[in-house]
Structures are given as C-alpha cells and as structure tokens.
C-alpha cells in the first residue's frame, strides 16, 4: 500500500492530518495523561502544562489544565494541596486504580480504536 502525499503550501497534507489527530488525541486523553504523570509524584498545573508541551510538543492553555485538574479533584481521582504559593496535585488511591485499570486494558483499547478506524 502506498500513501498518497500531497504538498499544500509547503506542508504535506498527510503531516497536517496526523498533527491534527495527534492534538485531538492529546485533548481527549489529557486527564489520563496527567494522571499517568502523577504516578511519578505530585505536580502543579504549570508542571502539567510543561510536561504535555515537552512530551508531545503541544501547548495547552492554563485554563484547560486547571479546569481539568479541578474536575479530577471533584471526582476524587486527584487531591490538591497548597504548597507555598502554588497548588500541587497528587494521585489518590481511586486515581491510581483508574490508571491501573486503563493500563491493564490496553489490548481492549487498541481493538476499540481499530474497530472505529475500520468502520
């Protein structure tokens, strides 16, 4: 199978499509991405923004991240505490179990994504 690549305005359209899908996946799974990083220890909202930017090359707004962290906290998945002048979040037991369940379901998730893409 040969991939068709068309150059538009100096950028390959295939690269644009992949970049957009990459961004959509990051936005859709940002809660899981942040909770997975929290397995390594507590982080602030700024740390979460930096982590996503450094790991995925995608800059998210502080409003998006803080809103997500507050939502995770309301759902009992993370716990926020004030440390000096910033709020630092850590994974709760419920959050750790959630991440563990996701990791143990990788094959099911891959199968589901394959089913969606071949629909």
Image (tube, rainbow, N blue to C red):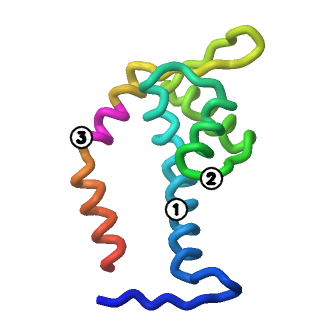
Q: Which residue is mark 2?
A: 58
Location of residue 107 in the rendering, given as x and y in whole percent from the top left corner = 22, 53
- As drawn, which residue projects farthest toward the top? 84
Figure quadrant of residue 51: top right
For the N terminus, give its image quadrant. bottom left
* Chief secondary structure of the magenta portion: helix
Mark drawn on residue 41: none
**Quarter of the figure with residue 89:** top right
The residue carrying mark 1 is 22
Query: Which mark, residue 104?
Result: 3
Q: Residues within 10 Å of mark 1 (few under 14, many from 20)?
A: some
Q: Residue furthest front?
A: 10
Whole-percent x and y of residue 75? 52, 30
Q: Image quadrant of residue 43? A: top right
Q: Give the residues drawn in magenta, as a range.
A: 98-104
Asked if the magenta segment contains residue 66, the reply would be no
Secondary structure beneath dot 2 equals: loop
Q: Measured along the vertical axis of the image, is residue 35 above or below residue 81?
A: below
Relative to residue 44, is residue 116 drawn left or right?
left
Residue at image position (42%, 27%) is 95
The structure residue drawn at horizontal position 39% and vertical position 24%, both measured from the top left corner, is 94
């Amino acid at each position: 199978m040969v991939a068709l690549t068309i150059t538009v305005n100096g950028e390959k359209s295939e690269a644009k499509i992949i970049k957009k899908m990459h961004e959509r996946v990051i936005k859709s799974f940002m809660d899981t991405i942040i909770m997975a990083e929290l397995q390594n220890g507590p982080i602030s909202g700024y740390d979460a923004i930096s982590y996503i930017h450094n790991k995925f090359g995608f800059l998210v707004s502080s409003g998006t991240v803080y809103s997500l962290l507050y939502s995770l906290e309301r759902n009992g998945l993370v716990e926020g505490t004030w440390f000096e002048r910033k709020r630092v979040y850590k994974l709760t037991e419920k959050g750790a179990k959630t991440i563990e369940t996701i990791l143990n379901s990788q094959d099911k998730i891959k199968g589901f994504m394959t089913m969606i893409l071949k629909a």
